[in-house]
Amino acid sequence: MTDRIHEFLRNRREEGPCLVLDLEVVRDNYSAFAKALPDTRVYYAVKANPDPQILELLARLGSSFDTASVVEIEQVLAAGASPDRISYGNTIKKERDIARAYALGVRLFAVDCEAEVEKIARVAPGSKVFCRLLCDNNGAEWPLSRKFGCAPAMAPSVLEYAHRLGLVAYGLSFHVGSQQRNPKSWDASLKASAAIFRDLAERGITLQMVNLGGGFPTKYLKNVPAVRAYAQAIFKALRKHFGNRIPETIIEPGRGMVGNAGIIEAEVVLISKKSDDDKVKWVYLDIGKFNGLTETMDEMIRYPIRTPFDDDRLEPCVIAGPSCDSVDVLYEKEPYLLPISLEIGTKVLIEGTGAYTTTYSSVGFNGFPPLKSYVI
Ligand SMILES: *Cc1c(COP(=O)(O)O)cnc(C)c1O
């Protein structure tokens, strides 16, 4: 909680849950990435929070951007970044969207199969492509495992095909899974990457770049290693597998760039029990899975929740959202400890909510409006 957010919430008049995000924290996070990995270019993963003020700040600071759609590309351009700072990093693109991205000046694209290479060769001739590798997401609290990427053994033929079709076979990418708590997770994929670099070199193709993806965590309830620890582990793995021919590298932090910059203020709507001898209380908030807290799915992300009574005795509670859908329960398998003095109407603060909240919020399920957002 920063003083600026505290001050903002003290003066807020409106009703309903809202996210307040402090740009100074984003600025600090960007500096931490830039300083810890000085030879690596930062591509902010726009999907984590595409608020125009965040994009404008990062564009001013010199960041590049990882985008997944034409709309995100347009948002980045509107924020003042030139198209040479944009990667179209989604491996699943319509050919007409590739053509639009190309017309907007984008020349860097992700692929993970030959069919996607063909689309790019047809409508974005001469562009650079990098091939995404499947990656074991052990240690990640929000895994992204099977959907994107190809087996490392398939990557050389995908990239050789790109080369033959007149594209620049530029490099490789992988994502170790979001909220990755183990800094050593990059090692195995860097080993595979170095082998692919060698394989392609033997075919006369020189790869140049490894995209290290995202995965850098935000502190929720448990502590996480600092960015510096990730940087050291990554650099060590690069040295080990590439020797003194370290390739160009990029990172794509999303959560790690904006997660800790935001706080949601919400309100307790109801506290009840399901039977007289029920051991756990049910606490219903005015925010749930459909208006911002989607990442509580399967109880994967456990947000810190602050109340005005945090020094009081705690008791196990089930926490649920306000909608009439029974999946809208945030924490039940592992009940959440909240103060016994919590009351209907109490305002609570949900920390670390700057990433993957506003955009995961539904348009108006059950009449609950999308999550309001203030960037200060
Ligand atoms: C979502 C995504 C990211 C950001 O991941 P974080 O774990 O939030 O840092 C980076 N790269 C790609 C390709 C993504 O899809």
Image: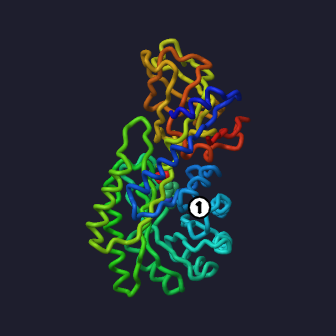
Question: Relative to the observer, which residue lies in front, 85 or 331?
Answer: 85
Question: Relative to the observer, which residue lies in front, 121 or 56?
Answer: 56
Q: Is residue 286 above or below residue 364?
A: above
Residue matched to label 1: 68
Which residue is at a point 47% across and 79% down the rendered structure image?
Answer: 169
Q: Position of residue 182 (x, y in %)?
A: 34, 50
| Disc 1 within 8 angstroms of ligand 1 (CB) | yes
Which residue is at a point 57% across and 19% down the rendered structure image?
Answer: 271
Q: Residue furthest right?
A: 367
Quarter of the rendering containing residue 38? bottom left
Q: Is residue 180 visible?
A: yes
Q: Position of residue 369 (x, y in %)?
A: 71, 37
Which three-letter amino acid code belongs to the residue tagged 1?
Answer: Ala
Question: Relative to the observer, which residue lies in front, 196 or 38?
Answer: 38
Categorize mark 1 by other alpha carbons within 10 Å: few (<14), some (14-19), many (20+).
many
Q: Position of residue 194 (x, y in %)?
A: 33, 72
Q: Is residue 362 above or below residue 116?
A: above
Q: Residue furthest top?
A: 276
Q: How many marks?
A: 1
Question: Which quarter shows the C terminus?
Answer: top right
In the picture, measured across the screen, residue 208 lies left or right of residue 17, that is: left
Q: Position of residue 52 (x, y in %)?
A: 65, 52
Which residue is at a point 63% across and 29% down the rendered structure image?
Answer: 286
Q: Is residue 147 visible?
A: no
